[in-house]
């Protein structure tokens, strides 16, 4: 039964997460944290931070890690397969149709309409992470980490992996 749950937890966001990994992350969070309760918001945010610091698609990295944590090696393979299965199935079934209409103004307009929804989903997820951090470590450290991270990534162009590593060290030494 756990393998079926792992499959559904990553297949459903794969179907509904139009726009790729970033669009499906809040949907995966809903499945993993709220529906199946395999992780807390804090644990999910740590997996997300780790996944963002590694190269490659975020959704498959998270599916592999979470699948492994919940169901071992079979869970890892099922999670990764479930993440790519919707795209794989649609590409096989609709490949010719996609090529025919890829430059259609209606298809491009649909993509523009979906972008605000993705932004809202990411904003809600960010707010939830902020609220969880506020409860866990307090307002000042949360704001300090957020502001320093923003400045390092956006202004100084520091790679996010180094920022995540620095935040982990900060938390380990000063908040642990």
Image (cartoon, rainbow, N blue to C red):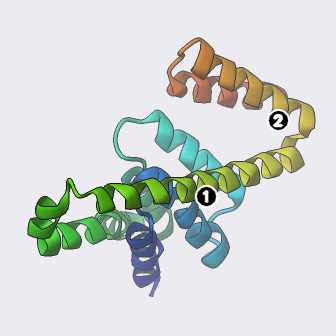
Give the structural element (helix, strand or loop) at label 1.
helix
Question: 128 or 167, which is in the foreground?
Answer: 128
Q: Quadrant of residue 168?
A: top right
Task: Answer with left or right where residue 89 lies relative to residue 73.
Answer: left
Q: Is residue 17 visible?
A: yes
Q: CA distance from mark 1 to mark 2?
A: 21 Å
On the image, the x and y values in percent for residue 73 come to 35, 64
Question: Dot 1, crowdedness within 10 Å: few (<14), some or many (≥20)?
Answer: some
Answer few, some or many: residues within 10 Å of disc 2's Cα (few below 14, many 20 plus, some between 14 and 19).
some
Identity of the residue furthest to the bottom in this view: 1
- Which numbered disc flags the more N-terminal residue, 1 or 2? 1
Q: Point out the image quarter for the N terminus.
A: bottom left
Q: Nearer the viewer, mark 1 or mark 2?
A: 1
Furthest residue to the top? 156
Q: Name the foreground residue: 162 vs 146.
A: 146
Residue 44 x %, y %: 62, 55
| Residue 122 in picture, x, y percent from top left | 60, 52
Residue shown at 57% from the left, 72% from the top: 31
- In the rendered structure, find residue 142 and report the number of the disc placed on it: 2
Q: What residue does disc 1 label?
A: 121
Locate the C terminus by quadrant.
top right
* In the image: residue 127, left or right of residue 10: right
Indicate the position of residue 57 as horizontal and vertical percent values. 36, 46
Mark number for residue 146? none
Which residue lies at the image location 91% right of the left edge and 37% below the top edge?
A: 139
Q: Residue furthest left?
A: 96
Secondary structure type for disc 2: helix
Q: Identify the residue at horizontal 56%, vertical 49% (top origin).
A: 47
Residue at x 64%, y 23% (from the top left corner): 166
Relative to 19, is 92 above or below? below
User: Is 26 on the left-hand or right-hand side of 174?
Assistant: left
């Amino acid at each position: 039964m756990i393998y079926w749950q792992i499959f559904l937890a990553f297949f459903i966001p794969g179907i509904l997460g139009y726009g790729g990994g970033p669009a499906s992350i809040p949907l995966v969070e809903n499945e993993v944290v709220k529906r199946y309760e395999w992780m807390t918001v804090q644990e999910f945010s740590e997996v997300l931070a780790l996944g963002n610091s590694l190269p490659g698609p975020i959704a498959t990295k998270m599916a592999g890690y979470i699948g492994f944590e919940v169901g071992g090696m079979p869970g890892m393979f099922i999670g990764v397969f479930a993440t790519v299965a919707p795209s794989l199935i649609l590409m096989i079934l609709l490949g010719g149709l996609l090529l025919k209409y890829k430059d259609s103004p209606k298809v491009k307009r649909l993509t523009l309409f979906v972008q605000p929804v993705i932004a809202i989903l990411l904003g809600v997820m960010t707010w939830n992470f902020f609220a969880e951090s506020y409860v866990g470590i307090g307002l000042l450290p949360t704001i300090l980490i957020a502001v320093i991270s923003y400045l390092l990534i956006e202004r100084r162009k520091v790679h996010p992996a180094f920022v995540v590593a620095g935040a982990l060290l900060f938390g380990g030494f000063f908040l642990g």
